[in-house]
Image (cartoon, helix red, strand yellow):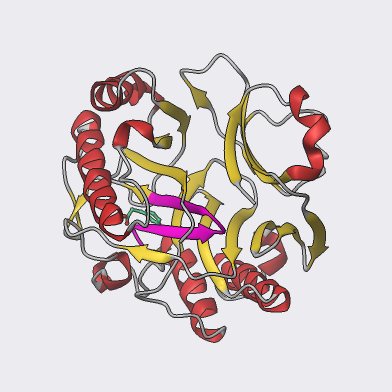
Amino acid sequence: MKLTLTTTKNSAWLTGAAGRVLGASYIGLQPADSAAGWPRQSIIAPLLGCTSECVQEIWQLEGDCHAGEIDGIAYRRAGGLLFGVIELDEADFASAAAPLAAATEEAYRRIFRLMEREGLPHLWRVWNYLAEINRESDGLERYRHFNIGRQEAFLACHHEASGNVPAACAIGLAGGPLSIAFMAGDQPAVPIENPRQISAYNYPATYGPRSPTFSRAALAYLPGQEILFVSGTASIVGHQTVHPDDASGQCAESLANIAAVVEQANRASRGQPYALENLSYRVYVRHAADFPAIRDVLAGRLGAAAEVVYLQADICRADLLVEIEAMASQSLGNC
Ligand code: 3EB
């Protein structure tokens, strides 16, 4: 049961293999025939440096998937692997004291309930998108409201909120619903931290009343396969933002952080070491004007052939100009 991530600007070739798609994310302009038969996270944001209007990242399997929908979660399952997407409209939580926190808590509670029902208790990777992440509401930045709801759900559903937590990203878009995609499995993932950074779940309270619930990376396992998920990684050393107002400097620092995380992952890996040049990247750029400078730093470090998708989006601290996430996978021998 090998899982592969295919990045494509042309979905036509996929129609014959629809039964073997676990799920997908579509970045950019959404295709008109948007009723994909598989769970799909729509990331409506401008693509940068790309002539296509939409990039599709598709998780494919060698075997068939079982499809389902429950509690507003579109999901697919194959063996001990589950991928799902939930979108919630904050307007439906308008009566709550803090609607975004309430919507976030509800989304995560539903995800944990589905995982329990499916007997797949290990959350590996979560992709979080919300509108206007840096805007203040009720005296608190919206990202901080999100963190309150997320941590509350982890605790309420008896999932650890520190240590053994999933890899993740939390990104701001111009509008749209709260959108959360997740991958979960029957095997625990191995969480990886970065010695250059304080673990996010231990950030001091100056960054919000509840800490973010994510690990810097995770190694996840399917039969005969290891998957490396590197969380959204930014220009943070210790717990502080470094290189304010310097997109190139932030990009280089983010890459240094990813290099440190990959080095830690390589110590825990059951296979061959991962190399920075061979990962697949998604890069969030706050200001489109910074894109050429950021691309040059990445090309210098990774080579021009590296697989990188760039999009314009907001990062969860107002002083962060870029955030980079990555993934890779490898076959393992019989062990
Ligand atoms: C950071 O390191 C930058 O809240 O899930 C990166 C990845 C960030 C995930 C999250 C936040 C999250 O704090 C922001």
Where ligand 1 lies, by quadrant? Answer: bottom left
Q: Is residue 237 left or right of residue 31?
A: left
Quadrant position of residue 106: bottom right
- In the picture, residue 198 is in which quadrant? bottom left
Query: In the shown orientation, is residue 328 left or right of residue 36?
Result: left
Q: Position of residue 97 (x, y in %)?
A: 57, 76
Report how many numbered discs are placed on residues in the image: 0
At horizontal 67% and vertical 68% (from top left) the residue drawn is 93
Residue 98 in the image: state x and y as whole percent.
Answer: 55, 71
Q: Residue at x 41, y 42 (%)?
A: 326
Q: Which quadrant of the figure has residue 67? A: bottom right
Q: Residue at x 26, y 34 (%)?
A: 251
Horizontal side of residue 187 vs 87, given as left or right: left
Camera-nearest residue between 41 and 264: 264
Please give the range of residues in magenta.
214-231
Relative depth, front residue between 310 and 95: 310
Residue 135 in view, yes or no = no
Front-most of residues 318 and 231: 231
Above or below for 98 versus 283: below
Magenta stretch, main secondary structure class: strand
